[in-house]
Image: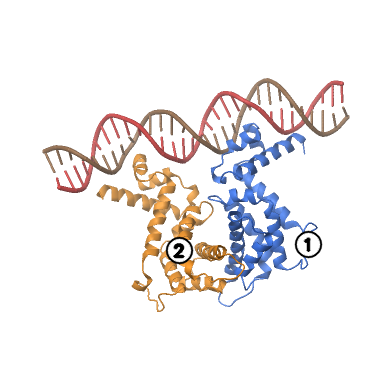
Chain colours: A orange, B blue, C red, D brown
Amino acid sequence: MDRRQRKTREAIYRAFTSLMREEDYAKVTVQQIIDRADIGRTTFYSHFETKDALLKSFCSDIFDHVFSEDPGKEKTHDFSHVHDTKARATHILYHLQEHIGVLSGILSGESDAVFMGFFKEKLAELFSSSVPMEPGVPYEYRLNSIVCGFCETVRWWTKHSGYTPEEISGFFFAAMPYFD
Amino acid sequence: MDRRQRKTREAIYRAFTSLMREEDYAKVTVQQIIDRADIGRTTFYSHFETKDALLKSFCSDIFDHVFSEDPGKEKTHDFSHVHDTKARATHILYHLQEHIGVLSGILSGESDAVFMGFFKEKLAELFSSSVPMEPGVPYEYRLNSIVCGFCETVRWWTKHSGYTPEEISGFFFAAMPYFD
DNA sequence: TGCGATACCGGACAATGTGTTCGGGACGAT
DNA sequence: ATCGTCCCGAACACATTGTCCGGTATCGCA
């Protein structure tokens, strides 16, 4: 990729994440991103079709990184039981912690749909095999309940930062006693 | 209230709810509401400052109705144990069922923040005294978890209509085994 | 019934934000 | 050095919002 493209893209990302730490996603305009990135209007639109496309690209990058890694090969954090659900959940939270400030802008107020859509899709995939059956309750509902529970836990975290991923994970599983 | 005002307001509400059954809230414009209500532009803005104000007013009406009633005095549905949490939850679901089609427009996709904000506030109030303590887990997290669980249950319902309020309520409490 | 108050109308308006088009200039890769 | 690609900025059409106006219709009430 052309160095100019790379620099422009990075400038856009920097501007975007920087703005997300200050204001809600819905209230940020393309013009603000352009101004802070210090690029031409045309340039922005040659990289991203819309503001939403930028957000989607951003989500893609984060989640590809967070979910693609094999927890067993994780070097930075040490887990003894690397293959169970709790360890995976904690692992995800560790990665999200790096973006916690940005997330609060994306999740607070309005327009969390894009991020949550991405997140829920990935989580459903991850949790789908661990959902315990219970007679009389649809599998889909149970999966949705777990996935949403995790998402809302992360949202709660963005408003009550200061907890460690382990603590947050502990809260989550305490609220889902049948699930591990 | 002036008959003209009443008629206008009802026309706006009718147009709004009708549009909500077809499209997402975020995609509906004020102009669409005006056109379908068949009123003047000025008239709409003399009733509501913005589209969001209309939604808030709509939410107010619904939730005031749903939450203000004493379940014990409910005539249309018969509950044996009128004062426990499960009965209240089911009661709320009964009322929401009347608006289920509209809700799917308000909740699907984007901009569910207004509705969910209202709903969560009311639910937190309602559930606050029933949250069981658990050492090591903040009370706020537990309450949030229950409230969000209920909201997401309703959202799930809008996408899987056909279940009765009792069934939905049953699903919810099955997913919150420590909570009743 | 008639009168004053008030709500409606619709057309025009400024303001904001979006996304596109254009020619010209700068930079990168080779 | 040069060709292709990217960036620039200014201008544009478009959509939407929210406001202002004078004129008209309807309401509530005496």
Describe the element under mark 2 as helix, strand or loop: helix
Name the subunit of mark 1.
Answer: B
Q: Nearer the viewer, residue A149 or A21?
A: A149
- Numbered label attached to residue A147: none
Q: Is residue A105 visible?
A: no
Name the amino acid, label 2. Answer: Glu
Residue B138: x and y, percent?
A: 57, 72
Q: Nearer the viewer, residue B46 or A71?
A: A71
Residue B67: x and y, percent?
A: 72, 57
**Residue B139 placement, left or right of B78:** left
C-alpha span from label 2 to label 1: 41 Å
Q: Residue furthest front?
A: A135
Judging by the rendered image, the residue that carries numbered circle 2 is A125
Q: Nearer the viewer, residue A31 or B146?
A: B146
Residue B91: x and y, percent?
A: 72, 60
Labels 2 and 1 share a subunit: no
Up-down relation of residue D21 to residue A78 (above or below)? above
Q: Is residue A43 visible?
A: yes
- Numbered label attached to residue B78: 1
Residue D5: x and y, percent?
A: 25, 42
Q: Residues within 10 Å of mark 1 (few under 14, many from 20)?
A: few
Q: Residues within 10 Å of mark 2 (few under 14, many from 20)?
A: few
Name the amino acid, label 1. Answer: Asp
Describe the element under mark 1 as helix, strand or loop: loop
Q: In the rendered image, which quarter is residue B148 located in?
A: bottom right
Instruction: Check if mark 2's residue and mark 1's residue have beta carbons within 8 Å.
Output: no
Name the subunit of mark 2.
Answer: A
Residue at left offset 78%, top offset 67%:
B80
